[in-house]
Amino acid sequence: MIPLVDAFTLAAVGAGALLFMAGTLGLLRFPDTLSRLHTLSKADNLGLGLVVLGLLPQADSLAGGLKLVCIWLLAQLSAATASQLIAGVLPRRKSGS
Amino acid sequence: MTLLLDLALIAWLLALAMHIAMAPKDQNAIVAFIAFGLLLGLGWIRLSSIDVALTEVAVGGGLTGVLLLRAEAHLRARPATGRVTSVAHRTMAALGCAAVACGLALVVLLFPAPAPTLAPTVAANLDATGLGNPVTAVLLAHRALDTLLEKVVLLLALIGVWSLAPDRLWGGAADLRPAFVPEPLAYLARMLPPFGVLIAVYMFWVGADAPGGTFQAGTVLAAMWLLVMLAGLRPAPDTRRLGLRLVLVGGPALFLAIGFLGFAIADGFLAYPEGAAKPLIVGIEAALTVSIGAILGLLVAGPARKAPTP
């Protein structure tokens, strides 16, 4: 019987992977750019968060766990900025060209 | 289980490479190239080369991608030349690339087992250098000459990029600030650089004993500087400013000076005295990190677009 910690890791990382797949599916199937940005931010935010949550019990030390959380926060910051920038370009592109 | 992951990674890499080669629009190809750099970094990690993976992701994926995007934007503004590569040329190029790939694969697969390598010798002599990371020991102690020449090549590349400016603009500043700076970009340029500098200093410092090093740290520094310039928080500097040129040359110059000092205090050029190897190496690395950050940042910034301020 696998230990409880490993089972938690598997469950959380699996859920995160499912969210990433859902995000990619939305990227491919949604009609316009704004809704695609919406699905991508779900994958980056919650999907990566679940993966990090699942990997936290496997970290070697407290510092390692904190580094994982920092990675999640940095990924959120850059993904949020990128989404805002892309969404901001859209009305200028529509009115310009 | 890991074999499945490796095969999947190889399949992704090949599929992405085909997509890059056959993408109709250059912009799509460049974005796919950035993703290719990231996947290739994963490949390097599977080969246990974490230093190379860091460099691949930072330089191959990130910095080169930004450079190519800016170049593509400049080229898009010009009128199209109307020249199209013929199918015959493309097939010859494809066959040439496939031949090189097959040749490399054959060479690697026909290695005798165990493959010829100097890694055990390096690992045995690690104590003499005082370092814990064999990659850093090879780069800065055993093959220091190669590293020195690489940094000089970087400087020559920067001079080459600068020489693309018209004569009357020589010594001026590059033009990075876009006409309209979105508020989220300015926010990111204020939030990220402190963490970026911290991460860069950490990568340089830990490179002595664990994967890391000057090139990766210098690339992160360059990325933070570029972010600040792109958001318009600081203007791009005049390339003829003495302070800037001293920062650019400082790293390779210190490396060269310590190399010549090796004649006086040790066996020869770029030799380190016993016991003082690690402080010298860390000093060289510190200067190199700052220089590489400045060089790579100016490489992406491009040639001067404004006349130098008097």
Image (cartoon, rainbow, N blue to C red):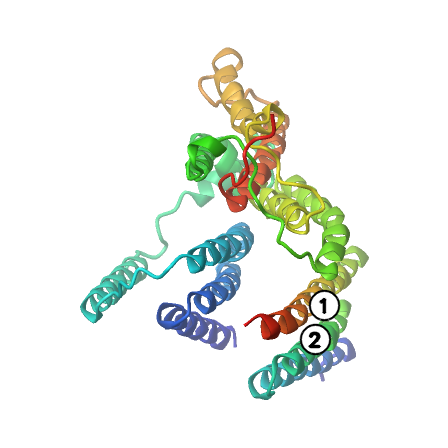
Q: Chain of mark 2?
A: A
Q: Nearer the viewer, residue B291 or B83?
A: B83
* Measured Cα–Cα span from mark 2 to mark 1: 7 Å
Callout 1 secondary element: helix
**Percent coordinates x, y for residue A46 in the rendering:** 74, 77
Residue extending farthest top: B264
Mark 1 residue type: Ala
**Residue B259 as seen in the image, left or right of residue B194:** left
Q: Is residue B266 shown to the viewer in this render?
A: no
Image marks 2 and 1: residues in contact by CB distance under 8 Å: yes
Q: Nearer the viewer, residue B211 or B243?
A: B243
Q: Quadrant of residue B287?
A: top right
**Percent coordinates x, y for residue B43 in the rendering:** 48, 63
Mark 2 residue type: Ser
Q: Nearer the viewer, residue B52 or B22?
A: B22
Q: Which residue is mark 1?
A: A80
Label 2, residues with CA under 10 Å away: few <14, some 14-19, many ≥20: some
**Percent coordinates x, y for residue B216 in the rendering:** 58, 46
Q: Which residue is mark 2?
A: A41
Q: Residue at x 66, y 41 (%)?
A: B235
**Percent coordinates x, y for residue B95 in the rendering:** 22, 66
Query: Which tag, 2 or 1, sits closer to the chain's start?
Result: 2
Q: Residue at x 74, y 50 (%)?
A: B195
Would you place residue B52 above or below residue A21 in this image? Answer: above
Q: Chain of mark 1?
A: A
Label 1, residues with CA under 10 Å away: few <14, some 14-19, many ≥20: some
Q: Quadrant of residue A84?
A: bottom right
